[in-house]
Image (cartoon, rainbow, N blue to C red):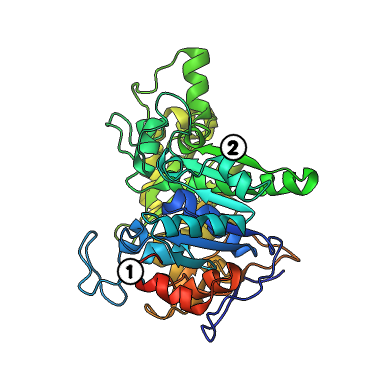
Amino acid sequence: MTAVEGMSEVDRRPRTRVGPLSGIRVADFCWMGVGAVATRMLADFGAEVIKIEARDRLDMPRRLPIYKGEARSYGEEDPNPDPNKGGLFNNYSRNKLGVTINMKTDRGQQLVRQLISASSVVTENFAPGVMEKWGLTYDELDRLSPNVIYGRMSGFGHDGPHHRYKSYGPVVQAVSGMSFISGLPEREPSGWGLSYMDNQAAYYNSAALLMAVLHRNATGRGQEIDVSAVEAGINLLGPDLLNASVNGVATRRPGFPAGNRLLDQPAAPHGVYPASVSDTWIAIAVFDDEQWARLVAVLGEPEWTRDPKFTELKSRVAHQDELDEHISRWTAQRTSHESMELLQHAGVPAGAVQNARDLDETDPQIAHRGTFFELDHPVIGVAKFEGTPIRFTRTVQENWRSAPLLGEDNDYVFGDILGLDPAEVAELTEEGVI
């Protein structure tokens, strides 16, 4: 099995890529996770993704700082701001090239059209209407690059009464119904805080782009792709939608959301329980009487487990509060990882509730899989990044470079790809076009 590979930053110059998507050039207008993570997947596996940016309106991920070596509160300003330090940008943009183009100038719009003509895929996740304002409709893109694939990624899609509404991950999560069903029983919806649906929708986007590439390989025809992040979120609501449409059951009702309890099949114990170290926890899920017998053996067969309330699954489900108290007293005597090892060895589904530091520093499974890998960067130095959770026997995820510096690849893209001579590139730089 091929391991994820990282490279030293000896040479950042663009080079021939390897991987199943090598030979595909993407003119990438994407920013934020819903688009940037989708095109990162393409870049990870060989596509030449050219990220198009503007110097006078930096992508938000470039404006979010990264701190190494000292803790700072969320939202605190970077005392030494640098658009090349943005932690989110560097995470989203590995393996990509980066150019800067001022779309407010006629020459800048000409350069974009030249770049599109030299590309076979175009991607964007602006608010609907931005690309049209520049005249970059699908018909125009197809004229510039016949049979182009045009991937459009937005919150609500590009038609319908709400298609011009602006959105970010938390908005998508709210409108799709995800926020409403989150939280604890008898409490108000809690929401998710961060933009998790950005990344979820991104994988739909990358899958759609790959299907379009397969379709073009088979038929020679490109197409326009329109992915709605709200609809991607709705795809995660199956049980709740079914309950409402078939049974007429309201989403907000006594006892729902169920927190850590399971509704669609009986299971008990089924929850998260305290461990011996403060604010550490272990998740345990027991689905049948056979697993319960194994759990009882690990617990040492205490007297309370012989109570008729706990000897059968149906009665355990009916007495979950009392059951959870017993389980919590046992889990509180050992660390979450000690409990996980004991239970897993006995065949009981259980897992330590890990935080980011656990994943990064101590989890042996994550370390074995090489989930995190290091890349060097001219500004932030060596940093860890999360890899793609896929392993192939023959296909390599080649991490050849960390994220591009602002405008780092202008000379290569405008010179080597578009054919401008160095004097013209220098002149365009001086004029603020690139």
Residue receiving disc 2: 289
Q: Indicate the quadrant where residue 120 lies.
A: bottom right
Q: Is residue 308 visible?
A: no
- Residue beneath the point at 49% across and 60% down: 111
Classify 25 as above or below 171. below
The quadrant of the image that shows the N terminus is bottom right
Viewer-side residue, 127 vs 395? 127
Which percent across, then down, holds residue 278?
A: 29, 60
Secondary-structure class at tag 1: loop
Q: Are marks 2 and 1 in contact (CB under 8 Å)?
A: no
| Nearest-to-viewer mark from 2 and 1 | 1
The three-letter code of the residue at mark 1 reads: Pro
- Residue beneath the point at 45% across and 34% down: 230
Viewer-side residue, 434 vs 277? 434
Q: Is residue 200 visible?
A: yes
Which comes sooner in the sequence, label 2 or label 1?
1
Q: Which mark is residue 252?
A: none
Which percent across, then down, holds residue 132?
A: 45, 40
The three-letter code of the residue at mark 2 reads: Asp
Classify 167 as above or below 39. above
The quadrant of the image that shows the C terminus is bottom left
Farthest-out residue, bottom: 10
Which percent across, then down, holds residue 268?
A: 49, 37
Viewer-side residue, 225 vs 394? 225
Q: Is residue 297 left or right of residue 59?
A: right
Q: Is residue 369 left or right of residue 161?
A: right
Bin the neighbour count of mark 2 within 10 Å (Cα to Cα): few under 14, some 14-19, many 20 and up.
Answer: some
- Estimate the spatial distance between the alpha carbons at disc 2 and disc 1, rounded to whole Å: 57 Å
Q: Which mark is residue 83?
A: 1
Classify 22 as above or below 259. below
- Residue beneath the point at 46% across and 66% down: 99
